[in-house]
Amino acid sequence: MVKNNRVFDGIYTISIIGTVGQIVNVSTPQYFQNANYLSNKTVKAISVTENSLSDRFLITLIDTSGTQLLFNTPFRDLLQTVNGNPNEKLRLFRLNNIDLQRSYYTSVIPFGYATTSNIFNINFYI
Amino acid sequence: MLQPIAERTYLVEVNVGALSVQKQVNFQFIPQLEGATIYAIQSFGATQLALSPNGSAIVTTAGLSDLTVTFAVGDNQDYFLVPVADLNSASISGFIRMISDKKLNLTKSFITLQGNANLVANQSVLFQFTYRAR
């Protein structure tokens, strides 16, 4: 079978958890994680889960050589649905060697967490 | 419909400043996009992002309809008075408008305020360029 960018070998999901008392300041990078699961893989698509804060996040992805791949992509553009209609909305990419230790999200509005809870999931289709 | 496979993207902010019909606001110089091959363009309004990265209010979805954008390639205005609302994915079923590979001259590209009924002074509009590095 010929593989293309809509045929995925796996999905790697990161759950971003906010803890009680944690403050997220404007433009301060919130790095995804220490594990570098994507460092030798090609990401073919990315999606995220909706939440009440999703209109304030920007995503920046950087590869293992330090090159910016995505700069300030609005979080809501990575949602799979538009008004509940998933028309062709999965955003397709060809991103090699993403470094999750250097990649981050930022917020354009500061906020804190009253309870420990999931903020969002980001799904990398490989 | 064909959709782009993005290798790199870059978000650019343009502030409308004081309101005046037919006013033009040029894009600033963006080093990362200089000489880059751009093959898709999106615009974003307040529905997608609550504030701009620089802290400015964002043009509403209705306000996007008051704006057009002209993109230059070299000195030629290859994309002339494109409705900014037509580049807003959320308004066009999630699609991303693709263009043939172009090296856009951003400092000679500009937005034009065709009206200001739905705009507020000093709001920003956001453009995301999908590109291939030099």
Image (tube, coloured by chain):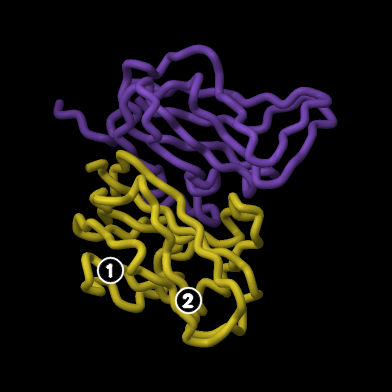
Chain colours: A purple, B yellow
What percent of the width, then of the height, locates residue A51?
66, 41
Mark 1 — residue?
B72
The chain letter for the residue carrying disc 2 is: B
Residue positioned 35% across, 45% down in the render: B32
Residue positioned 54% across, 14% down in the render: A34
Give the residue furthest to the left.
A2
Q: Considering depth in this image, is B40 or A124 the residue closer to the camera?
A: B40
In this view, the mark in front (1 or 2):
1
What percent of the width, then of the height, locates residue A66?
39, 26
Q: Is residue B25 left or right of residue A30?
A: left
Q: Which quadrant would residue A98 be assigned to in this image?
A: top left
Query: Do the residues marked 1 and 2 share a common chain?
Result: yes
Crowding near the residue tagged with mark 1, few <14, some 14–19, many ≥20 C-alpha atoms within 10 Å:
many
Mark 2 — residue?
B67
Q: Is residue B15 left or right of residue B42?
A: right
* Nearest to N terminus: mark 1 or mark 2: 2
Crowding near the residue tagged with mark 2, few <14, some 14–19, many ≥20 C-alpha atoms within 10 Å:
many
Q: Is residue A123 left or right of residue B5?
A: right
The correct choice, above or below, for A93 with respect to A66 in the image is below
The correct choice, above or below, for A104 with respect to B111 in the image is above
Q: Amino acid at mark 1?
A: Ala
Q: Amino acid at mark 2?
A: Leu
Q: Is residue B50 visible?
A: no
- The quadrant in which the N terminus of chain B is found is bottom left
- The quadrant in which the C terminus of chain B is found is top left
The chain letter for the residue carrying disc 1 is: B
Q: Is residue B97 left or right of residue A37?
A: left
Q: Considering depth in this image, is A87 or A28 the residue closer to the camera?
A: A28
Q: Considering depth in this image, is A15 or A33 the residue closer to the camera?
A: A33
Q: Which quadrant would residue A70 be assigned to in this image?
A: top left
